[in-house]
Amino acid sequence: MKRSAICYRGAVAGICLVLGWGTFLPAGEVEEGFVSMFNGKDLTGWEGLPGWWEVREGAIVAESTPEKPSPTHYLYWKGGEPADFDLRVRYRISGKGGNSGIHFRSEPRPNFDIWGYQADFDTNHDYTGYLYQHGRGLVAGRGQEVVIDEAGRRTVTTFAESDELLEAVRDDDWNEYRILARGRRMILWINGVRMCEVEDHEPKYALPKGIIGLQMHAGPPMKVEFKDLRIREF
């Protein structure tokens, strides 16, 4: 098993973890310090657009078909509005052109819309591993470290080639997204590989806390699944 050491800087300086690449959580087990967000049986603790979200074989599922095309909407976690946290989610997406994501530090909007940060993924990998935000669009691309000052000016550093990072992502299979948010800094990993990192100081957009939501995106027929959702708050 390939292993890599990840050291956090800035607001989380001095913390180093050794991560196993491609390892997943055994069924029914949650790491020490983490809280399970999903019971694997039903949507207790979650709220979404009626008729679109369900639980199948231990996973939260939303599906769009030619007979029943889906609008864009979100499933809200009702467990609070985390500020600083380590979030782990396993996801699987299928369907040509399928697009989804995991929202955090976000605000609910009418009709189960949302506004805030999103850890993106899609079947074409145009956005997989990107940090997106409503109102600004792309915040950081795959392989980028981005610092945004109070006036919205960005300093972008490339730490890895975008296509090389995609080698860690499994098509039509389960992947694990990890989202670390601490202070102004946010880091995204997929399967233990760092995808992007952002330090955001722009007051208009840098929400310090907010809800967590799962996305179902309008578009061609697709299916998205989530399981093993757990969070550790600092």
Image (cartoon, rainbow, N blue to C red):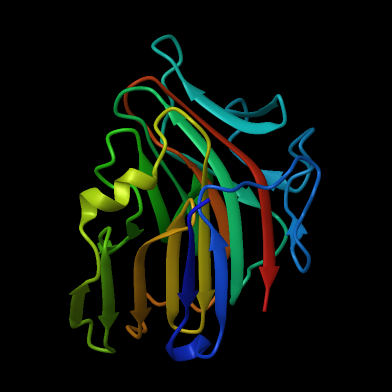
Q: Tell me the residue at 79%/33% (across/down).
A: 41
Nearest the viewer among 180 and 116 is 180
Q: Tell me the residue at 31%/46% (across/down).
A: 166
Q: Quadrant of residue 154?
A: bottom left
Query: Can residue 107 be seen here?
Result: no
Q: In which quarter of the image is residue 50?
A: top right
Q: In this picture, is 203 found above or below 211?
A: below
Q: In this picture, is 105 found above or below 226?
A: below
**Residue 150 point in image, percent of width and height:** 28, 89
**Residue 223 point in image, percent of width and height:** 47, 25
Nearest the viewer among 81 and 144 is 144
Left or right: 94 in relation to 104: left
Nearest the viewer among 133 and 35 is 35
**Residue 216 point in image, percent of width and height:** 46, 36
Left or right: 53 in relation to 170: right
Q: Tell me the residue at 77%/54% (across/down).
A: 30
| Furthest residue in direction top, as rendered | 67
The quadrant of the picture occupied by the C terminus is bottom right
Query: Can residue 233 be seen here?
Result: yes
Q: In this picture, is 90 found above or below 70?
A: below
Q: Tell me the residue at 56%/69% (across/down).
A: 18
Q: In this picture, is 177 found above or below 135?
A: above
Nearest the viewer among 53 and 224 is 224
Q: Quadrant of residue 138?
A: bottom left
Q: How many labels does the image show?
A: 0
**Residue 134 point in image, percent of width and height:** 34, 59
